Amino acid sequence: MIVPIHLENQTAVKYNVVIEKLSKLTFNRKVAIVTNTTVSALHLERLISHIECSELHVVTIEDGEEFKTLATVEGILNELFEHKLDRKSLLIALGGGVIGDMTGFTASLYQRGIGFVQVPTTLLSQVDASVGGKTGVNNRYGKNLIGAFYQPEAVYIDTEFLKTLPKREFAAGIAEIVKMAVMFDRDYFDFLMDADFSHKETLEKVIERSVELKAEVVNLDEKESGIRAVLNYGHTFGHVVENETKYKTYLHGEAVAIGIMMANALSVELGIMSEDEMETVKQFLLKHNLPVTYVIKDVDAFYDKFFLDKKAANNRLKFILAKGLGEHIIRDDIDGTVLKKVLKNFSEKIV
């Protein structure tokens, strides 16, 4: 199955998200695969066996969100220069969201931009991170604050890669899946409630629908000036959780799950989501072993970190909120006292 990406405001930008068993990939140019130590041991040999190119190199970095930095990107760039890649060369991101983000960002920088493709190996990257051209790295101020919108030439999604994925990593991807359903498609959310993710055909259907929803949004709004911001549901809160825990306590999808609960608590406080709807989402997350609680030690410090969010502008905070299930609303007029009231609930008790 193929999901096309065709950016509405850039007629020259077209590529496909291919969801099927990996086939032969032929490139008449130099290629460098960027991966990490964990993924390379599991999947590098298989990918190499599917590639035909004029010259092939492999760049392997350490595994972990803490290595998603400018220093790591500089290290990748140095290896590309050592291998004498040129402007017609291609990078292949083999790994999860961290690898995809850094490979895309590196591609955007190398000799002012070379091509790259995504071969995502985690559920989170297959349904979300590999599609749409968001690239970047973290710094001490927050997540993905340094980066670029830079589209891949193609995305190749093969569920076979997920067979080696730890259960915790798999669950982290489910958080991004439910995000799409709560924001855009109540019927899809209802389908997910009873979906058996261990069933191959069901999993492929889930991936396809998630990619379709994301593609619709990206095609309309590549650079997040409007509706694409909705894809950050749960992320404004979740990024602060990641920052406070130095990216070592939670996987990204786990932090998003916590962020979804915080965002839903705010929706309930504002009267745009019912307690029952919030509980339904909570039970779905718990069913898939995702965290739904977080103890905020300093409400004021947590609140202040919101202003480092990329969606904040002119000292106004923008929040993506669920309006019931299957609909969304963007608010930038929420009073700080209301926000702190919701955050205080997370500092005092289990939500």
Image: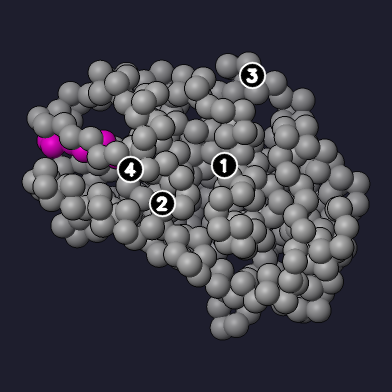
The residue that mark 2 highlights is: 67
Q: Is residue 63 left or right of residue 174?
A: left
Quadrant in which residue 123 is drawn: top right
Q: Amino acid at mark 3?
A: Ser
Q: Residues within 10 Å of mark 1 (few under 14, many from 20)?
A: some
Which residues lie in the magenta part?
Answer: 28-34
Does any portion of residue 71 appear in the rendered image?
yes
Q: Residues within 10 Å of mark 4 (few under 14, many from 20)?
A: some
Residue in the image at 63% along x and 79% along y = 316
Q: Alpha-carbon distance for marks 3 and 1?
A: 22 Å
Q: Is residue 77 left or right of residue 245?
A: left
Q: Alpha-carbon distance for marks 1 and 2?
A: 30 Å
Comes first in the chain, label 1 or label 2: 2
Residue in the image at 18% along x and 52% along y = 78
Comes first in the chain, label 3 or label 2: 2
Does any portion of residue 267 appear in the rendered image?
no
Q: Amino acid at mark 1?
A: Leu
CB atoms of marks 4 and 2 within 8 Å: yes
**Residue nearer the viewer, 283 or 149:** 283
Magenta stretch prevailing secondary structure: strand
Comes first in the chain, label 3 or label 4: 4
The residue that mark 3 highlights is: 198
Q: Amino acid at mark 4?
A: Ile
